[in-house]
Amino acid sequence: MAVRVCFRMDRHLGRGKDYLRAYQTVWPEMLESLAQTGWRNYSLFIRESDGLVVGYLETDNFDEAQALMAAKEVNAKWQASMVDFFDNEGRRPDESLEQLTEYFHLA
């Protein structure tokens, strides 16, 4: 059974165009790895005024999907390319996401 997952991250206000441009050309091997590790129906949203990034995905087990993705070499490379866009106190962006609690859903 799939679960819906929503998370947030805070992006630096600078270099917003560079950040969005990176997502216009996500590496094919990164997309393939996300699919292989169970990330489905994955979307990112941004509030440009303050850098808030919100992600949504569906997966069978989010902890497992995160762990499988973290073990991928392409993910380490992607996270390294994204680190300057976030203020994560030395952590990779994928290590600093804050999962949100779902409290209502209308199907």
Image: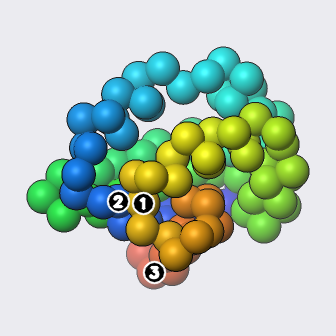
Residue occupying the point 79% across, 54% down: 70
Query: In the image, is residue 13 above or below residue 33?
Result: below
Residue bearing the label numbered 3: 103
Q: Position of residue 1 (x, y in %)?
A: 78, 57
Residue bearing the label numbered 1: 86
Is there a contact, CB below 8 Å, between mark 3 and mark 1? no
79 vs 24, left or right, is right
Is there a contact, CB below 8 Å, between mark 2 and mark 1? yes
Looking at marks 3 and 1 on the same chain, the residue that comes earlier in the sequence is marked by 1
Q: Is residue 4 visible?
A: no
- Assess disc 1: are there few (<14), some (14-19) or many (≥20) residues with their C-alpha within 10 Å of its C-alpha: many
Secondary structure under the numbered disc 2 in the rendered image: loop
84 vs 58, left or right, is left
The quadrant holding residue 74 is top right
Q: Position of residue 12 (x, y in %)?
A: 30, 60
Looking at marks 3 and 2 on the same chain, the residue that comes earlier in the sequence is marked by 2
Q: CA distance from mark 3 to mark 1?
A: 28 Å
Q: Which residue in the rendered view is the most extreme toward the left?
A: 49
Q: CA distance from mark 3 to mark 2?
A: 25 Å
Q: Position of residue 92 (x, y in %)?
A: 61, 61
The quadrant holding residue 27 is top right
Q: Residue 11 shows which numbered tag?
A: 2
Residue toward you, 8 or 101 = 8
Residue toward you, 107 or 12 = 12
Name the colouring of the figure. Answer: rainbow
Q: CA distance from mark 2 to mark 1?
A: 5 Å
Amino acid type at circle 1 is Phe
